[in-house]
Amino acid sequence: MENRILGQRYELVEQLGHGGMGTVYRAHDHRLRRTVAVKTLSAELALQPEFLSRFQREAHAAAALNHPGVATVHDVGEDASGGVAEPYLVMEYVEGTTLSHVLKGGALPPAQAADVVGQVLEALEHSHRHAIVHRDIKPANVMLAGTGRIKVVDFGIAKALSEVATRLTGTGVAVGTPAYLAPEQIKGGDTDHRTDLYAVGCLLYELLTGRPPYTGDSPFSVMHQHLTADPVPPSRLRPELPPAVDAVIVRALHKDRADRFADAAAMRTALSAAARATPPAPVPTPTARDPRAGAVVPAAVASPAPPDEVPAPRPARRRPGRVVFRPTAEGAVALLGCLLSLVISRSDVMEGSAFSRVALLAAVSGGVLLLWSARLACAVAWGPVAEAVAVFSELARSYIGWDTKYVILALMLGVAAALCLAAGYRDERAGGFALVAFWFTALTALWFFLDDVRKVGVFYVLLLGVPLAIGAQVLKSRTRPPSPVPSAGPHAAVPHVEAAPAGRRRAR
């Protein structure tokens, strides 16, 4: 079956998704020769005589938006090749997945959730300045690219739907997804930019807890809760969240628009301040101990409980000797260093048997330490490898003398070595890569400035001192007690956060 072509221009190549308002396709624009996303709207909408004109007007307004967080609207029209007018919207094609798909894997880390929502607020800040309100912010309308950047899609569609529905009913209608509807939308009243902020509060709640603020057996039950109920504070479901995050969400979800944030910039500023109050979660390395080992993790609370019944979690007890194997690029580099040191120990790269024994010891030690810290394994295993390479380097004073340009080159390598060592010491996540660079730059510089006797002695000192320093730093970070989580009891101080205005790949 041949691919359909809309408007004698857009060839529909692959269906990417289907929803209540229509179907999304990956398409090829034959005129501009580019990949685009085409959203064809349902036949029921095409039967409404006023819909197409309103839809075109809103889509053209959305096309004026120019922001990296907004999926660009390229074109809008209707196709009558099938005998019935079929409205369609042509948008920027985004490589990535929707937040609704991401949420199938559970709640996001607090820092990532704050970053994603902060980007959504930046996009809304831009659209609100152009007097465009989205009216349907939800996980399915936020695309997350592989780079971590987001794109908000479907600008203009919700307003066109609500305007036509209001004209038909005469009393207004709720348009959107029940889990993210603001009270004024449910009542069919006027909406403005603060309607979007309510939906963003719902989105942030779900990203942090894995569920929307209101759930029920039917859409009517959910909408009734939006009108009458207060949500369970997210910290009840995820106790490590600080009160500042609760305060941001509670304010965004006020029933009265006047009590919400004044604009997207104010909410973004408050969220940024709240995120800084959230202790960062430990990032596992390929050979780091499991950060959850020995931790006391409170179970999720299924139903709301009085604040005084929610105990503060006790600090996790650290066990620095606990290991867990998680393969990553840093671990692979450390393992490669161990293998190269082993090969060097069996060769005659340097005269004398001492270096061969040292290389063998470094290979074995690096392999053992790899089970505890890939960074420390890199510090041990790559020293003999870099020394063997430096031996054959012609950047040596005995070969080229004190030529100014070579002296400057060696000095610059020494400075680079110092910077790499500092980075390797301080970076707990990927410091092993910096330590590999340290060995090659440091030993190359040493082989230029020092004579044969001294350079070997300095190498042995570095091979002992650097791993000891890194090992002490790793041990210190592993045994450091985590920051206690503040209690959410009835007498706990909840800061009033207010800022001055200031899967399947899917494309939209």
Image (spheres, rainbow, N blue to C red):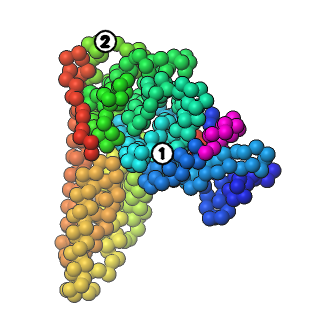
User: Could you tell me the amino acid type at mark 2?
Assistant: Pro
What residue sits right under mark 1 in the picture? 152
The tag earlier along the polypeptide, 1 or 2, is: 1
What residue sits right under mark 2 in the picture? 306
Residue 55 lies left or right of residue 501; in this view the side is right
Q: Position of residue 97 (x, y in %)?
A: 53, 44
Report if residue 39 lies within the magenta region: yes
- Measured in 3D between alpha carbons, the distance from the residue under mark 1 to the one under mark 2, in whole angstroms, is 37 Å
Please give the range of residues in magenta: 38-53
In the figure, residue 33 lies in which quadrant? bottom right
The residue lying at 55 percent from left, 47 percent from top is: 57
Q: Residues within 10 Å of mark 2 (few under 14, many from 20)?
A: few
Which mark, residue 263? Answer: none
Q: Position of residue 133 (x, y in %)?
A: 45, 41
In the figure, residue 116 lies in which quadrant? top left
User: Could you tell me the amino acid type at mark 1?
Assistant: Val
Residue 258 lies left or right of residue 142; in this view the side is left
Please name which of the two marks, 1 or 2, marks the residue nearer to the observer.
1
Q: Secondary structure at mark 1?
A: strand
Report if residue 228 lies within the magenta region: no
Q: Position of residue 467 (x, y in %)?
A: 25, 53
Q: Secondary structure at mark 2?
A: loop
